[in-house]
Amino acid sequence: MSSITPRPFYFLSWIIPISVIIGNYVGDIYVGTATFIGLVVFPVLDLILGDGKDRTPESTSPHFFDFILYGHVFFQFVAIASFFYFIQSNPEMNLLILATLSTGFGTGISGIVVAHELIHRKGLPRFLGHLLLWTTTYLHFESEHVRSHHRYVGTELDPASARAEHGLQYFVLTTVPFQFISSWKIESERSNSFWFHRASLYLLIEISTLAVLYYFMGSTIMFAFIGQSAAAVYLLEYVNYIRHWGLRRGVKDKVTAQISWQSNARLSRYVLVELTRHSDHHLFANRPYQSLRSHDDAPTLPGGYFACFYLAQIPPIWKRVMSKRLPA
């Protein structure tokens, strides 16, 4: 029987967004703190801390775990404000780029990972999930992910499931436009209109947001906002890549635990609010993150999401390592 996850461990998920906020307000080289933690410290700790199959029973009160998520919502908007504050100090280009990457790293966690959890819920949580996606310029992710990805995962119809022959960079360049097209198609069919539907509304909101930023705050802030969104989206699609790479099924075949890669790496689990237990998420999409389970029959990544980051950046090495782990 699995042990129960100590609740304080989920506070680790606040480290990156808080680092972004402090770094942006302090300025100078400190704007890169979140990037350093995410790309240097966490990959090492991911390997050192190892795996754990602990989880929280579904009967446990959700209030604390919801508090963790709502904390991210607050941090995300403060982080964006701190980013704009830093830009208005007219920083050097190298520091602006570093701040953009760090803010994007924070947005990748608070703006997308947490949004992913919230858009699977109803009412206020779902609305907050939309607000978070608004800060990533990736609002269409909601309709594509919920209505297409979960239905077609691992099939030829899912642009978010990477084939075994594809490298990360190729996947990112192709999945981003095809996911947008998928979202547009889904919402067009739902509304019986090619132009007037939720996907077109999402696009209008995003264009309007960029126009407002340009008009009131200038081109630098507008392009920096796009930059941090791009960094966050790259992290999202990196995650999509590693959690479905090479796993295929027929369109009519049942979704099983073997259609998603899972990881029980402790640090990735707690920092990314159990995103790594993706096999169980596809079996029970509405199960709260803290209660997601590990499956013994699910294919397992060689490390956590942080530890696998550099491996995935080099497709030949990634394929050599992962091909041995593909289910027969």
Image (cartoon, grey):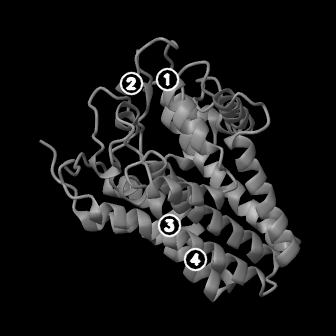
Q: Is 124 on the left or on the right of 157, as rendered? A: left
Q: Is residue 64 above or below residue 127?
A: below
Which of discs 1 and 4 lies nearer the camera? The answer is 4
Residue found at x 51% / y 60%: 128
- Secondary structure, mark 3, is helix
Say whether disc 3 or disc 4 marks the residue closer to the N-terminus.
Answer: 3
Q: Which residue is mark 3?
A: 73
Q: Which residue is mark 2?
A: 258
Mark 3 residue crowding within 10 angstroms, few (<14) / some (14–19) / many (20+) = many
Q: Is residue 72 above or below residue 216?
A: above
Which of discs 1 and 3 lies nearer the camera? The answer is 3
> In the rendered image, which quarter is residue 240 located in?
top right
CB atoms of marks 2 and 1 within 8 Å: yes
- What amino acid does circle 4 point to? Val
- What amino acid does circle 2 point to? Gln
Q: Is 181 on the left or on the right of 161, as rendered? A: right
> In the rendered image, which quarter is residue 166 located in?
top right
Q: Which residue is mark 4?
A: 78
Q: Disc 1 and disc 3: Cα gap in Å?
A: 33 Å
Mark 1 residue crowding within 10 angstroms, few (<14) / some (14–19) / many (20+) = many
Q: Which residue is mark 1?
A: 247
Q: Disc 3 and disc 2: Cα gap in Å?
A: 32 Å
Q: Disc 3 and disc 4: Cα gap in Å?
A: 9 Å
Say whether disc 2 or disc 1 marks the residue closer to the N-terminus.
Answer: 1
Mark 2 residue crowding within 10 angstroms, few (<14) / some (14–19) / many (20+) = many
Residue found at x 77% / y 67%: 224
